[in-house]
Image (spheres, rainbow, N blue to C red):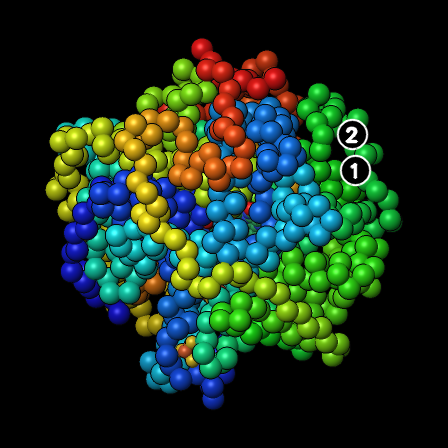
Amino acid sequence: MGLFRPGKTRYVDADILVVGGGFGGCGAAYEARYWGRDLRIVLAEKANIERSGAVAQGLSAINCYMGMHWGENRPEDFVRYARGDLLGLVREDLVYDIARHVDATVHKFEEWGLPIIQDPKTGRYQREGRWQVLIHGESYKPIIAEAARKSVDAVHNRIMVTHLLTDRARPDRIAGAVGFSVRDGSFYVFRAKAVIVGAGGASHIYRPRAIGEGTGRTWYAPWSSASAYGLLIPTGAKMIQMENRIVLARFKDGYGPVGAWFLLLKSQATNAYGENYEAAWLDELRARVGKYADAQPMPTCLRNHAMLEEMKAGRGPIYMHTQEVLDSKEKEEIGWEDFLDMTVGQAVVWASQNIDPKETPSELITSEPYVMGSHATCSGAWASGPEDCAPADYQWGYNRMTTVAGLFGAGDTIGGSAHKFSSGSFTEGRIAGKAAVKYVKDLKGEAPQLDEAQVKRLEAAVFRPLETYRLGRNAIVAGTVAPDYLTPLQGLQRLEKLMDEYVGGYSVFYVTSEPLLKRGLELIGMLKEDMERVGAEDLHQLQRAWELQHRVLTAEAVARHTLYRQETRWPGYYYRADHPRLDDAAWHVFTVSEYDARTGDWRMGKLPVHHIVE
Amino acid sequence: MPTYTDMTRCDGCGECVDICPSDIMHIDRVYRRSYNIEPNFCWECYSCVKACPQHAIDVRGYADFAPLGHKVRVLREEARGVISWKIRFRDGRLKAFTFPIRTTPWGSIRAPADYAAPDAGALRSPLLAHEPEALKVEALPALRPQG
Ligand SMILES: Cc1cc2nc3c(=O)[nH]c(=O)nc-3n(C[C@H](O)[C@H](O)[C@H](O)COP(=O)(O)OP(=O)(O)OC[C@H]3O[C@@H](n4cnc5c(N)ncnc54)[C@H](O)[C@@H]3O)c2cc1C
Ligand code: SF4
Ligand code: SF4
């Protein structure tokens, strides 16, 4: 333990490097191989792709499927839905692009062996709601991983990717990535012509509601370490909508999903007095957000708002009346499978608290906020859109390429395209995979060159926490309190507390303001300085140290964007107390930031929202 | 702690270490058996529980909100393509469920390179692999280009 620079340096060459083997990454690997038969395609993953990412334990539904061949929905319908849910602000070209391809992805999943439940009467996929189809999805991730493994030249599991590399001559062009093996401590240098980042969104940016062991039971996985943003931001890639964090209404403590209960089983949520409270808040919501309050279905954040107001008024607990709907064995199985396939922890909560959903209602609560790009939210990188339908200022050559040449993204990485979920993230990976092949082929001889000095600097930085710990540890007898270093957990807890208190976490009912944000940013600034002094006692803690680095930078982006957008666009996700209403005249735009890693400066701006679907 | 290892069942094979997405199942140096080093980073995802050949790992719900006395046990049978759950409530009530997990043999997915190579010009079209056939509609939908 505590050996400085424990392993060798290993160089890996690739035409296309995929960072993160979750849904976006696996889709990218598959499609890149389909089009790039002669290319070297390599995947680097911090865990084991067999069970990694947000879908590690499985899912019980595919939340994005059109059913075009049955005439169920058209891509335009989906754009209207996503736009309404995000109160007007989505990249319609990107959402449309996912919607028009996603059915092919899902049909392929079925062919590969994913059990998709069929409606015995119609023979179609059993719908959970308008966009969702039910699956027996415990093995969703292993099935997708099998396809990805068969697509690449090599999967490098247990490589924590810490930084992206840029070209020696052109810093706005990608040249690869570095990271380390969490198993043997080798320093990995990936030289690549194109990089596709599918490293997933962020939990543990804000203080979780649980306080002990239960902090592991966040809604988004504890290993969703914000790397999709933490890797991109230092390259200067433009990021958008980082203020658009998501808060989820879920079963209390276990964070079991509610979709099947609301949509399929038609269960009702009420306050403690049995009142259906949502409709009662509609007028108040109209005063806050205007016409957007009348979008159908009611936008996710506005439903949160109604629940929060009930809780503030002391009319909690909020209950989901599961007992009213589980009137058959079949429905009981659907209810339990919903959790056993994707949130086993909720089944554990029920068993432990003697809650049989057939007999007893269950509490709902709003979660701590998360930062991601694939759910009812759309933080992430500004990306080029599809050549055949994106507005001119939304495209610069290669679909899903960020503003750094050769750097692509998928899933949580890409901003503006909400409601992708698992199938849409995989689809976006496919779109990025094909575009990256095209990019590499167009490059011909002009391969990017590594900047050796940059690699050496990063090598020292990557392993520094081990050295910091070794030296600092000698100054104390035992325990976790040392004057010269912070453990990754101590740094994480400081981040979560300050984000909660200053940047609108659950403990202040998601409220923030300019003075609070400015004070929060001061404290983030000091935390960033202290990040130079994080100590890691072993390789596992070194992984935690770099996850924290990615989280801190992402958190800063969230605070900067929240400060910049002077309105309350999404009540129920967060509130700017000093700008309590939605303001379409000034803020019907995307917020965009560019970070300068050398100076630590952020440049903020606005980008236009084009409506290309009626 | 969320997962814990039964001292008498674990033989130290390391399957749980290999699979845990959180990298928190580690082998104890003294006992040469696994344990959860960071319960507060455990998602109760059951990946390790499902993977353990000795059925040596179990879950005790998070202490900060799960009262003691419950059990949620699982048996995942890849070859049969099913997963079975047994749930015991704190008050002793029992429930059992079995669900399918896959409809095709493991390893049977056709690799993308096993399909005929697309012609070079198709790289410039918006079509993805297996389209339009896999869409099951005649053509990929498109919007008119925008200025
Ligand atoms: C509880 C829950 C329920 C959900 N329910 C549904 C549902 O019912 N239906 C649905 O369609 N979708 C659902 N989703 C959403 C879906 O899981 C996500 O939208 C999707 O997984 C996002 O894909 P991604 O590729 O961006 O991220 P992920 O799938 O999370 O993949 C990210 C990958 O990157 C790896 N990684 C991260 N950082 C690094 C690094 N620094 N170096 C190397 N590798 C790294 C991770 O280990 C992981 O493998 C749910 C998610 C959760 C958590
Ligand atoms: S997989 Fe099971 S037997 Fe093997 S080390 Fe882990 S707990 Fe022990
Ligand atoms: S339940 Fe999941 S997170 Fe917890 S130790 Fe097992 S594999 Fe790791």
Cβ–Cβ under 8 Å for marks 1 and 2:
yes
Q: Are marks 1 and 2 on the same chain?
A: yes
- Location of the N terminus of chain A (image quadrant): bottom left
Residue position for label 2? A282
- Going 58% across and 73% down the picture, which residue do you hit? B74
Q: Which mark is residue A65?
A: none
Disc 1 marks a residue whose amino acid type is: Glu
Label 1 residue SS: helix
Disc 2 marks a residue whose amino acid type is: Leu
Res A412 visible: no
Vertical comparison of A513 with A461: above or below: above
The chain letter for the residue carrying disc 2 is: A
Residue position for label 1? A278
Residue A351 in percent (x, y) is at 69, 70
Vertical comparison of A452 with B48: above or below: above
Q: Residue furthest top?
A: B147
Q: Can you tell which quarter of the image residue B88 is in?
A: bottom right
Q: Residue furthest bottom?
A: B8
Measure the C-alpha gap from mark 1 to mark 2: 7 Å
How busy is the neighbourhood of tag 1: few (under 14 within 10 Å), some, or many (20 plus)? some
- Location of the C terminus of chain A (image quadrant): top right
- Going 38% across and 31% down the picture, which residue do you hit? A400
Label 2 residue SS: helix
Residue A195 in percent (x, y) is at 29, 40
Residue B113 in percent (x, y) is at 31, 47
The chain letter for the residue carrying disc 1 is: A
> A65 left or right of A258?
left
Residue A275 in percent (x, y) is at 86, 44
- Going 51% across and 20% down the picture, which residue do you hit? B143
- Going 60% across and 74% down the picture, which residue do you hit? B73
Front-lying residue, A33 or A256? A33
